[in-house]
């Protein structure tokens, strides 16, 4: 388990795991032949489906099934679907009860060919009942897989997601003073998907109607709008004086944090002047460029010159030099964290990178990130600057070489070399690295390069 | 779909009265319930001629030689006739009848007050297929993961609205001229003007303000078709509140359009509009969307055609009032609960499409001259399509086909009825088996069906004491469907295990509309499952879905092979 989680940054391992679970028969709705007792697998009902919920079993244990008969109703990320049996036989054992969730490709029931084999199948399901829940755990939601990769989890503030959006309600002629919400069909669908309260969204469509992009904007605005200035004394939904067990995601984070203790890390900090970067940001902000994309870009360009900082140590005996520079950026989401990855951040131009970032954030909130979009990072950025944090340090995600914690850029009084005192915007960055492969001098050189790039950011826009 | 009948009978005077079946048919036989559903939303726009501007048209040809006929009294039939057969209405039904009549050696004329081709060609099936072809391609191009799965890369697909509209219009013109030419070439006289029955075997036609021409014929077929039905309270302005007639011109693609009615017409337009970027809100009077379909097919169709698209819906509500957009205000739709009649909601949208079914176009036909009274506009007919008068007697030599009789409002049904009538007047008794007429909805993927739905079959089975079998196959197992990456789909067979009779087939999936004919032909010819399952299908083709379907049915061993199950049943 821990093994799987710790390596979830590594595409190779994760794809191996994937293969082993979905079995050699890749066909959806397949029943794998195992003697005369077949397993009924959770089918992939859509290309984006990673797990399915059992809405109801249409047959009970012991019922005879004919080929093509509907056995179970499965709720995927898109719809409820009847799943048919592709073989004849008897439904011997139900392994995932109604309301239960199982990853695509995992067994949800056993099908016996004859009535006599039902008992055998039942026994089998019991013996494998230890493994079954594990299967479920091993392939949790994409978000749950990715979360433990982010050591900064500890530092992430709990952000009340749904409520913090724009205040005020849609003003629309038909809204009867805000009592009714006028939103287009797609906007309503999106709001449900992204868990955005339409009552808090201001419509920009005809006559103030809420349209899809308003909902998307509201969903993205959530973390930004959450102001550190007025923190909730108690996060909503938390009952004091109680003990709440970890969710799967939080459990994974916990294990991963402990796992990280086996890596000898050290930290190097640097103060970077950001006046030029701020000016550039101001200039191209209107073109949709975000600060996150700028920082990722700058980091990637610095990594080009210091490939060792982009490397990692997988076996304790060697350097693994990654072929691409993929910047993972930690994002707080409801109840946890995810690290969408900006792939080839050194090669992609800043505008594309910004668009890509927005797309990834949207997907992350809709829980639609594909594995390669969150587990292929080679270097991680964690930025708490927007909350006014001026410095912090991050825990290295197992499987990577380094992570950089970025604080807020703040006006500071600075004495310059020529003996003058001036005001400059400065931010502090703090890199945590695996000392087995990355040494102090490596980080120092890398940070120096990064500072140069940030202080003269013309290369960021090509 | 029985609930559609309910709509008419249970809610008398409601807006949707025309949705219902003609009472002569609806109540007597449960089997007809099915067609009530079809009729309601007959995508087919199968009607024939009509002109919304009135039944007026210029006569291009004089027929003065026929004036002699008018000298005779209107009350008695003429001794000699100008034609063997006159068809009023040159839609698909009239056209089919005319072609078959010529083949049978009849001297035939067809009267048309508007344009040849009727609803189907000009304002229905034909232009809508052009729009749906566009929407299908747009859908493919926009489906990134679908393209990726095929290894294709397409950058942002876009469209030119006028170009799409032109495609639809050009297709209609082309088919119209094909139709006209085919009749001219065969020697069918096309008489231009509004046809009115003035007495037995006698029709006048012509344009207001000019002397009418009167012609006589041994037999007359009414094939005047239907027009979009607009419930009262709804103001159609042709711009923001529209019917299918306007929508097919595609003069605009609104951001948000409400579609009143979720049958064939509504569904097809939702497919077009969402592919072109609109968001759609369905307004359905019944509790369920897509009421006309087999419930299982409807459920699956909703999951594929409605839920993942930019569509929401209100069911169990009537749109009592729809006001077009004006003075900067949007289209306003007032909804009431279909049962309690309490105001339920108000919608503000950019446009509204009224797809609540079609009403027969029979006003001014002169039916009173032969003592016939229409029933909510429909011309009453018997199973041989002979017109019935107020005394329940048959009117000699007068037939009615197509949407105007309301039996099954589909273009090809009208044509089949026309052929059936020609068979009868040329001396061969013929009763059309409506249960063998397929229907299709050209969404992506398509829906098609023939015969009974499962609930109808079970009802019939209970009454007549036989067992019902249901077999299903999925498109997911079909090689060709998977090659196209279109494995979503289901084919369903409803049959009698005791003798292998096919009661109904329903298909939802890629090219379903083309696949249904193997089943409809089997029903029409009385072919049983135990025989058809030996028919060979080319591999790999989508037709193997039906092959597998027939093979998966279990017919009792006792059922004998060969020979039709029974004589086709008339409805």
Image (cartoon, coloured by chain):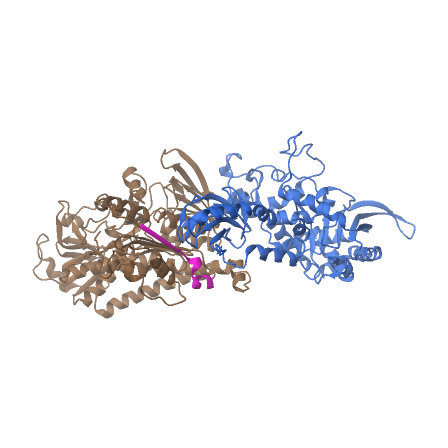
Magenta residues, start to end: B469-484
Screen quadrant of the C terminus of chain A:
bottom right
Q: Which hue belongs to chain A?
A: blue
Q: Residue lying at the far bottom in this picture: please name it.
A: B185
Report the front residue among B183 and A321: A321
Q: Position of residue B425 (x, y in %)?
A: 14, 60
Report the front residue among A111 and B3: A111
Q: Quarter-wise, where is residue B511 in the image?
A: bottom left
Q: Is residue B20 something one can see in this rendering? A: yes
Report the front residue among B4 and B485: B485
Residue B421 is left or right of residue A159, and the answer is: left
Name the residue rendered at 54%, 63% in the picture: B154
Report the front residue among B261 and B501: B501
Q: Position of residue A193 (x, y in %)?
A: 55, 45
Q: Which hue belongs to chain B?
A: brown
With respect to residue B214, does B285 lie above or below? above
Number of dots carrying numbers: 0
The answer to if B480 sits in the magenta stretch is yes
Q: Position of residue A395 (x, y in %)?
A: 75, 47
With respect to residue A143, does B522 lie above or below? below
Residue A424 is left or right of residue B388, and the answer is: right
The answer to if B449 sits in the magenta stretch is no
Q: Is residue B327 something one can see in this rendering? A: no
């Amino acid at each position: 388990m821990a093994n799987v989680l710790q390596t979830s940054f590594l595409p190779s391992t994760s794809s191996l795991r994937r293969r082993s679970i979905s079995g050699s028969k890749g066909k959806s709705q397949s029943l794998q032949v195992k003697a005369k007792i077949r397993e009924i697998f959770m089918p992939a009902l859509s290309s984006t489906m990673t797990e399915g919920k059992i809405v109801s079993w249409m047959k009970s244990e012991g019922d005879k099934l004919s080929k093509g008969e509907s056995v179970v109703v499965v709720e995927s990320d898109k719809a409820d679907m009847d799943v048919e049996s592709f073989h004849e036989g008897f439904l011997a054992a139900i392994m995932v009860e109604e309301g239960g969730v199982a990853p695509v490709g995992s067994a949800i029931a056993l099908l016996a060919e004859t009535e006599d084999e039902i008992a055998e199948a039942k026994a089998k399901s019991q013996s494998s009942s230890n493994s079954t829940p594990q299967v479920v755990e091993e392939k949790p939601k994409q978000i749950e897989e990715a979360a433990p990769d982010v050591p900064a989890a500890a530092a992430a503030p709990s952000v009340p997601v749904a409520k913090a959006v724009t205040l005020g309600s849609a003003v629309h002629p038909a809204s009867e003073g805000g009592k009714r919400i006028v939103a287009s069909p797609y906007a309503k669908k999106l709001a449900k998907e992204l868990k955005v309260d339409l009552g808090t969204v201001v419509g920009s469509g005809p006559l103030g109607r809420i349209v899809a992009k308003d909902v998307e904007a509201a969903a993205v605005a959530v973390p930004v709008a959450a102001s550190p200035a007025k923190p909730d004394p108690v996060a909503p939904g938390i009952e004091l004086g109680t003990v709440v067990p970890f969710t799967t995601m939080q459990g994974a984070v916990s294990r991963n944090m402990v796992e990280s203790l086996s890596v000898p890390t050290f930290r190097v900090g640097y103060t970077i002047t950001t006046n030029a970067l701020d000016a550039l940001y101001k200039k191209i902000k209107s073109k949709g460029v975000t600060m996150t994309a700028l920082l990722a870009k700058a980091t990637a360009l610095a990594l080009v010159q210091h490939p060792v900082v982009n490397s990692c140590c997988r076996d304790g005996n060697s350097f693994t030099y990654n072929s691409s520079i993929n910047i993972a950026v930690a994002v707080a989401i409801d109840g946890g964290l995810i690290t969408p990855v900006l792939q080839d951040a050194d090669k992609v131009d800043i505008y594309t990178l910004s668009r890509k970032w927005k797309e990834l954030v949207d997907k992350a909130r809709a829980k639609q990130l594909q594995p390669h979009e969150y587990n292929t990072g080679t270097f991680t950025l964690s930025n708490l600057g927007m909350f006014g944090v001026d410095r912090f340090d991050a825990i290295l995600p197992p499987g990577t070489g380094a992570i950089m914690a970025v604080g807020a850029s703040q006006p500071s009084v600075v004495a310059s070399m020529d003996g003058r005192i001036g005001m400059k915007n400065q931010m502090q960055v703090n890199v945590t690295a695996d000392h087995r492969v990355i040494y102090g001098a490596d980080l120092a050189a890398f940070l120096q390069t990064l500072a140069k790039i940030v202080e003269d950011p013309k290369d960021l826009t090509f | 779909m029985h609930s559609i009948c309910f709509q008419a009978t249970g809610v008398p005077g409601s807006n949707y009265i025309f949705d219902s079946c003609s009472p002569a048919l609806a109540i007597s036989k449960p089997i007809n319930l099915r067609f009530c559903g079809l009729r309601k939303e007959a995508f087919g726009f199968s009607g024939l001629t009509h002109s919304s501007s009135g039944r007026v048209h210029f006569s291009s040809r004089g027929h003065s030689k026929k004036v002699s006929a008018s000298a005779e009294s209107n009350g008695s039939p003429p001794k000699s006739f100008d034609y063997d057969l006159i068809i009023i209405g040159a839609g698909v039904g009239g056209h089919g009848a005319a072609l078959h009549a010529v083949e049978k050696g009849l001297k035939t004329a067809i009267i048309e007050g508007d344009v040849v081709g009727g609803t189907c060609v000009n304002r229905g099936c034909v232009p809508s297929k052009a729009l749906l072809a566009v929407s299908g391609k747009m859908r493919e191009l926009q489906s990134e993961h679908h393209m990726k799965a095929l290894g294709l890369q397409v950058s942002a697909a876009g469209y030119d609205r006028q170009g799409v509209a032109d495609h639809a219009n050009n297709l209609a013109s082309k088919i119209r001229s094909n139709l006209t030419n085919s009749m001219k070439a065969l020697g069918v006289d096309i008489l231009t003007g509004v046809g009115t029955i003035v007495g037995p075997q006698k029709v006048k036609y012509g344009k207001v303000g000019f002397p009418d021409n009167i012609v006589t014929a041994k037999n007359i077929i009414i094939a005047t078709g239907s027009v979009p039905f607009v419930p009262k309270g709804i103001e159609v302005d042709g711009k923001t509140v529209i019917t299918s007639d306007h929508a097919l011109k595609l003069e605009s693609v609104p951001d948000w359009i409400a579609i009143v009615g979720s049958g064939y017409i509504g569904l097809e337009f939702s497919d077009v509009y969402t592919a072109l970027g609109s968001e759609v809100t369905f307004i359905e009077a019944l509790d369920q969307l897509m009421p006309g379909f087999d419930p299982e097919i409807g459920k699956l169709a909703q999951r594929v055609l409605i839920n993942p698209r930019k569509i929401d819906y209100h069911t169990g509500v009537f749109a009592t009032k729809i006001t077009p957009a004006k003075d900067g205000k949007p289209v306003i739709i007032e909804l009431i609960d279909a049962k309690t009649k309490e105001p339920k909601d108000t919608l503000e949208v950019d446009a509204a499409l009224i797809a609540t079914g079609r009403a027969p176009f029979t006003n001014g036909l002169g039916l009173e001259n032969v003592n016939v009274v229409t029933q909510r506009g429909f011309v009453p007919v018997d199973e041989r399509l002979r017109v019935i008068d107020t005394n329940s007697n048959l009117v000699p030599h007068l037939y009615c086909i197509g949407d105007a009789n309301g039996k099954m409002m589909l273009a090809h049904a009208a044509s089949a009825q026309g052929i059936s009538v020609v068979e009868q007047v040329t001396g061969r008794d013929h009763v059309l088996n409506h249960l063998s007429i397929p229907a299709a909805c050209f969404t992506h993927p398509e829906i098609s069906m023939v015969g009974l739905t499962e609930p109808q079959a079970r009802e019939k089975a209970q009454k007549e004491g036989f067992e019902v079998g249901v077999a299903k196959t999925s498109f997911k197992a079909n090689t060709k469907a998977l090659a196209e990456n279109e494995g979503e789909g289901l084919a369903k067979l409803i049959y009698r295990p005791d003798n292998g009779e096919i009661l109904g087939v329903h298909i939802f999936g890629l090219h379903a509309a083309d696949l249904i004919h193997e089943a409809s032909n089997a029903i029409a010819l009385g072919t049983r499952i135990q025989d058809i399952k030996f028919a060979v299908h080319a591999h790999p083709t989508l037709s193997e879905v039906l092959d597998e379907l027939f093979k998966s049915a279990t017919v009792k061993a006792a059922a004998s092979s060969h020979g039709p199950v029974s004589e086709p049943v008339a409805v």
